[in-house]
Image (spheres, rainbow, N blue to C red):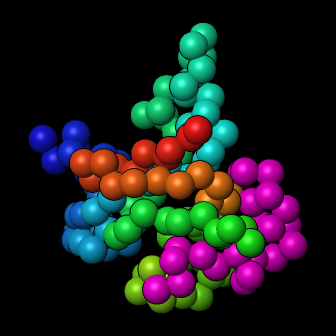
Amino acid sequence: MHMLTYGLDYKGNLCGDKHAHPGLSELELRYWQNPNQVYESGLKDSKFKLGDARSICLSECPVPSEDSLNWVCDYPEGDIRLSMTDWANRNYDYFEFLTPEMRNSSLQLQGPCYPVIFPSVNGEQTIPLLVH
């Protein structure tokens, strides 16, 4: 029942699982990162399903900014030298630390960071986007 409640992230981890790598005990909400995938999953004739969209575990819903672009980035690893706590305290955003190639990839919605474009709310351990 946990998997239905919490969902899996892009690494196959169960949100909220303290034994996951990285540890996700404080990150219980599932958030879909790629707005294009979320949009495509809602199209009438689309074969793409929301369950296949890239998701990540967060502790709270990200909020779009009115005057700049906020990002939700993948868990910090590799060249990104942030702890999970620092990443969460930065609102899951390390876009400024990316190489030019990684920034370009993110701008093309290919990660490791994805823009927060739509407002979202906590809905039973998932964070659906509110598209108007």
- The quadrant in which the C terminus is found is top right
Q: Is residue 4 above or below residue 63?
A: above
Q: Residue furthest left?
A: 1
Front residue of this view, candidates 47 and 66: 66
Percent position of residue 72, x then y: 58, 66
Q: State the image quarter where residue 76 is shown.
A: bottom right
Q: Which residues are magenta?
A: 89-110
Percent position of residue 10, x then y: 47, 51
Residue drawn where x is 50% and y is 65% of the image: 62
Residue drawn where x is 66% and y is 39% of the image: 36
Percent position of residue 94, x then y: 64, 79
Q: Is residue 93 left or right of residue 57?
A: right
Q: Is residue 123 above or below residue 59?
A: above
**Is 94 part of what is drawn in magenta?**
yes
Q: State the image quarter where residue 35 is shown.
A: top right
- The quadrant in which the N terminus is found is top left
- Residue 95 appears in the figure: yes
Percent position of residue 37, x then y: 61, 37
Residue drawn where x is 68% and y is 68% of the image: 66
- Residue 9 appears in the figure: no
